[in-house]
């Protein structure tokens, strides 16, 4: 029986890819006041950013209760005896803890391993995709877990912001708080390091910030996957994906959306590049 | 009352942890004191309502002895022990009883250590007790006023600890244990005065050092600065038995390690010692009684953890940036972009080499980049290199826009060489426009200039003359090919009115709708406008 892969919706996996690779995505919840939506199920990224622009209240997000994970596990356990769960960084939210808690509450007997990806967005997504491909290729649980752990230090992500307001209000700003106080309007480039949001650069113009993303991606070799994500600026992302595509014609570049849960914390106009490969 | 004090302490335990710098590299003084207090309270809560002050104090001392954590916790337990001795037999306490308790607490605390160090919790305890005594002798027996004096004296004493203990001075912090003790006293005082709201809603203000901060960051506290060997094992345990002799034990152990603390009575003794060979210590003490709560920690690891924690709390200042800037707004721009130190100066007010040298010496980093931001300061900045042991690089920014561009290119991750290269490259990618008024009539660069006319410079070359500064700026902008540009930042000078600036901003936006135009009150003297085009 093939290993089943579970992840949370913070990985921004395109739904087509998840389906094709048999990945089960546990949706986080997005709340606008009293309204609750399941990430990617009741609320698409497009609709979310429309709401974000029109809503007076800032959205919040929650990890679903462990019962949701338990339900997912038990259902999958009907078809397999090995499950690998890959969550977003435990420093950014409770997904990992909840996934582990749920393991103890399963009704069905099944080998199950929870791995903290230490990333979010497509940096997590690319790790999940690699795991799912290995599982499809017949790898057993230990191999999938081993591969995933080896891939964690090989992933990286950078995001261009035009405001850090959302990140700051949502309390996930981490070390990037040093970028908060700028008097000048600059474009912060943030990433994740050691599982936390980390400040990398500030560029005076958006074009330079996007150049930063390009140079970040071209700093990798033996690339297994790459992703370009936009929130509300698809043209920019398309252009960047095209530019990267001509540099790396042999690499699969996933062109996706920053999903609602990530979007609730980073805000609109974010542009992100994730890479799984070796840093030069 | 002491429950309130513990709650008060809890609110700032983490802050106190952060203060911790040797002599004992525990790095968790606040937490240790808090846990010790909790253990005291647990024991105290077992006493009944009819128990008098003496019984409660004895229970607290017992609880602290059992639950003491770390150096500071152990000393704290000695303080409760002394307090209990000082008020023994009292059901309720007067001001003078409290004074007796405090004096005894101080005495016992000193006695518990083989080598008492001043500038620590001990000093704070002693000075607070002395002040309490002086007050009670002169002005009476009221408990609240005695405690109030105690709190104030403790506060002063804490602030003064760095002048008694060089490592604190070096690290620019006060003694963490002393701070914890002060907070406990203060919490108790709030409670006695009935300030329940205060306890609930506010957070303690930590006392800051009264000694000017030495310009060194905590992570730079070197091994050489420490008064004792920073390696080995931090060893803690309790011996239980009969006929134990703490004094004799202390004497024996003092020869076998450092930071020796031995406290207790004939049936239970708590020991804290730093030793290279914990096995030897254990071998010796096991002959004295049964061993409990044995905890041996590698201090190298503690020290590393401590350094890492300090580093996490500090801004990363591996490379510091010193910039020459004038004007409140511009200083704000530079500071908000991560400039470590600003030397005031610019056109017509060039700082001296000494001014720059002082700033370079003061920043907490061995590698320093200087941004002169004026062509007349570049050479002066270069002089600093030969006058300091620090590695100094001058990134020759000749204008404010060049300085800002260089600053934005700074990468915390990169080494000094790479940063200097990146910053120099960024300088060449920005155009600087400066608009000022002519101080005399002259003929220059093909222009006839009348006194007080506005003149516009592009990267240092005179290119426009006009009656109004705004017009001069528009002329300079018109000379530039702005197809490739994206951002125009206008810094208005001290003499420019906000209305003029706003109007100019609107005009530029209208003229160049594709560009991101930002207007900032730079507040610089001399120049009506400084503008960057990128």
Image (cartoon, coloured by chain):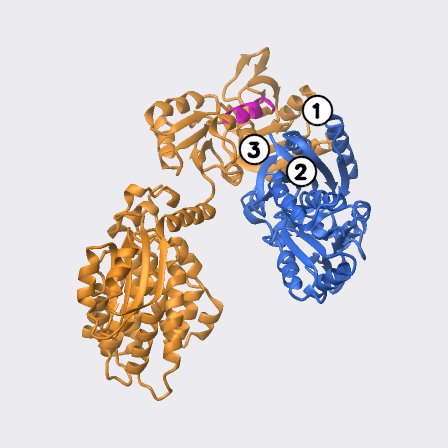
Chain colours: A blue, B orange
**Element under label 2?**
strand
Image quadrant in which you'd find residue B530: top right
Residue A11: image x %, image y %? 70, 48
Label 2 close to label 3 by CB (< 8 Å): no
Q: Nearer the viewer, mark 1 or mark 3?
A: 3
- The residue beneath circle 3 is B408
Residue B483: image x %, image y %? 72, 24
Disc 2 with disc 1 on a shared chain: no
Q: Nearer the viewer, mark 2 or mark 3?
A: 2
Report the Cα–Cα distance between label 1 and label 3.
19 Å
Chain under disc 1: B
Q: Is residue B292 above or below residue B192?
A: above
Q: Which mark is residue A74?
A: none
Residue B426 belongs to the span the image colors magenta? yes
Residue B80 belongs to the span the image colors magenta? no
Q: Callout 2: few (<14), some (14-19), or many (20+) C-alpha neighbours within 10 Å?
A: many
Quarter of the figure with the C terminus of chain B? top right
Chain under disc 3: B
Q: Main secondary structure of the magenta part?
A: helix
**Element under label 1?**
loop
Report the Cα–Cα distance between label 2 and label 3.
28 Å
Q: Which residues are magenta?
A: B420-429
Q: Is residue A78 above or below residue B439?
A: below
Q: Residue at left 20%, top 62%?
A: B250
Looking at the picture, tell me which residue is in the foreground, B460 or B230.
B230
Residue A128: image x %, image y %? 70, 46
- The residue beneath circle 2 is A276
- The residue beneath circle 1 is B484
Disc 1 with disc 3 on a shared chain: yes
Looking at the picture, tell me which residue is in the foreground, B18 or B69.
B69
């Amino acid at each position: 029986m093939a290993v089943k892969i579970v992840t949370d919706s913070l990985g921004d996996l395109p739904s087509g890819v998840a389906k094709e690779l048999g990945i089960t995505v546990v949706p986080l919840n997005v709340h606008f006041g009293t309204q609750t939506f399941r990430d990617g199920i009741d609320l698409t990224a497009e609709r979310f950013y429309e709401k974000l622009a029109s809503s007076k209240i800032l959205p919040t997000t929650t990890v679903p209760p462990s019962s949701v994970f338990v339900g997912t596990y038990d259902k999958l356990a009907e078809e397999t005896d090995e499950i690998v769960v890959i969550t977003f960084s435990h420093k950014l939210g409770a997904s990992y803890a909840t996934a582990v808690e749920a393991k103890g509450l399963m009704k069905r007997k099944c080998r199950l391993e929870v791995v903290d990806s230490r990333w979010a967005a497509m940096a997590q997504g690319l790790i999940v995709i690699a795991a799912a491909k290995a599982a499809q290729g017949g790898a057993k649980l230990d191999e999938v877990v081993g591969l995933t752990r080896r891939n964690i230090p090989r992933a990286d992500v950078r995001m261009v912001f035009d405001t850090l307001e959302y990140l700051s209000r949502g309390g996930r700003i981490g070390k990037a708080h040093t970028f908060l106080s700028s008097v000048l309007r600059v474009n912060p480039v943030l990433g994740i390091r050691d599982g936390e949001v980390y400040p990398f650069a500030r560029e005076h113009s958006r074009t330079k910030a996007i150049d930063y993303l390009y140079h970040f991606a071209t700093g990798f070799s033996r690339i297994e996957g790459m992703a370009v994500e936009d929130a509300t600026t698809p043209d920019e992302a398309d252009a960047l994906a095209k530019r990267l595509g001509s540099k790396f014609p042999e690499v699969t570049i996933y062109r996706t959306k920053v999903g609602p849960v990530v979007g609730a914390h980073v805000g609109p106009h974010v542009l992100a590049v994730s890479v799984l490969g070796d840093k030069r | 009352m002491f429950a309130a004090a513990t709650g008060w302490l809890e609110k700032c335990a983490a802050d106190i942890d952060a203060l911790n710098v040797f002599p004992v590299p525990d790095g968790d003084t606040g937490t240790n004191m808090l846990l010790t207090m909790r253990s005291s309270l647990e024991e105290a809560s077992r006493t009944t309502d009819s128990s008098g002050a003496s019984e409660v104090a004895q229970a607290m001392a017992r609880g602290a002895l059992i639950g003491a954590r770390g150096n500071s916790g152990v000393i704290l337990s000695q303080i409760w022990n002394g307090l209990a001795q000082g008020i023994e037999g009292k059901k309720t306490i007067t001001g003078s009883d409290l004074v007796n308790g405090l004096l005894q607490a101080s005495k016992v605390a000193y006695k518990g250590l083989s080598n008492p160090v001043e500038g620590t919790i001990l000093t704070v305890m002693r000075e607070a007790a002395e002040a309490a005594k002086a007050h009670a002798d002169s002005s009476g027996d009221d408990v609240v006023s005695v405690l109030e004096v105690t709190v104030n004296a403790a506060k002063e004493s804490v602030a003064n600890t760095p002048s008694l203990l060089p490592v604190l001075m070096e690290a620019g912090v006060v003694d963490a244990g002393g701070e914890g003790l002060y907070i406990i006293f203060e919490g108790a005082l709030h409670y006695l005065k009935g300030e329940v709201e205060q306890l609930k809603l506010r957070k303690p203000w930590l006392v800051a050092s009264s000694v000017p901060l030495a310009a060194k960051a905590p992570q730079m506290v070197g091994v050489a600065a420490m008064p004792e060997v920073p390696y080995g094992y931090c060893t803690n345990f309790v011996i239980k038995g009969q006929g134990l002799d703490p004094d004799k034990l202390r004497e024996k152990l003092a020869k076998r390690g450092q930071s020796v603390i031995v406290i207790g009575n004939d049936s239970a003794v708590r020991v804290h010692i730093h030793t290279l060979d914990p096995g030897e210590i254990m071998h010796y003490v096991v002959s004295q009684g049964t061993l409990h709560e044995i905890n041996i920690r590698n201090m190298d690891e503690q020290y590393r953890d401590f350094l890492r924690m300090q580093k996490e709390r500090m801004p990363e200042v591996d490379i510091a940036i010193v910039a020459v800037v004038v004007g409140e707004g511009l200083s704000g721009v530079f500071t908000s972009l991560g400039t470590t130190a600003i030397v005031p100066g610019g056109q017509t007010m060039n700082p001296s080499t000494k001014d720059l040298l002082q700033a370079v010496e003061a920043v907490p980093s061995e590698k320093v980049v200087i941004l002169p931001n004026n062509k007349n300061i570049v050479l002066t900045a270069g002089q600093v290199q030969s006058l300091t042991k620090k590695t100094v690089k001058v990134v020759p920014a000749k204008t404010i826009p060049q300085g800002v561009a260089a600053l934005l290119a700074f990468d915390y991750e990169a080494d000094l060489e790479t940063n200097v290269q990146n910053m120099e490259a960024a300088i060449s990618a920005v155009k600087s426009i400066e608009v000022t008024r002519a101080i005399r009539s002259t003929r220059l660069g093909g222009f006839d200039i009348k006194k007080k006319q506005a003149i516009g410079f592009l990267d240092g070359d005179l290119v426009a003359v006009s009656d109004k500064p705004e017009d001069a700026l528009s002329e300079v902008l018109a000379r530039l090919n702005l197809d490739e540009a994206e951002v125009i930042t206008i810094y208005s000078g001290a003499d420019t009115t906000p209305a003029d600036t706003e109007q100019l901003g609107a005009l530029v936006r209208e003229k160049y709708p594709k560009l991101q135009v930002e207007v900032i009150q730079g507040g610089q003297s001399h120049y009506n406008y400084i503008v960057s085009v990128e």
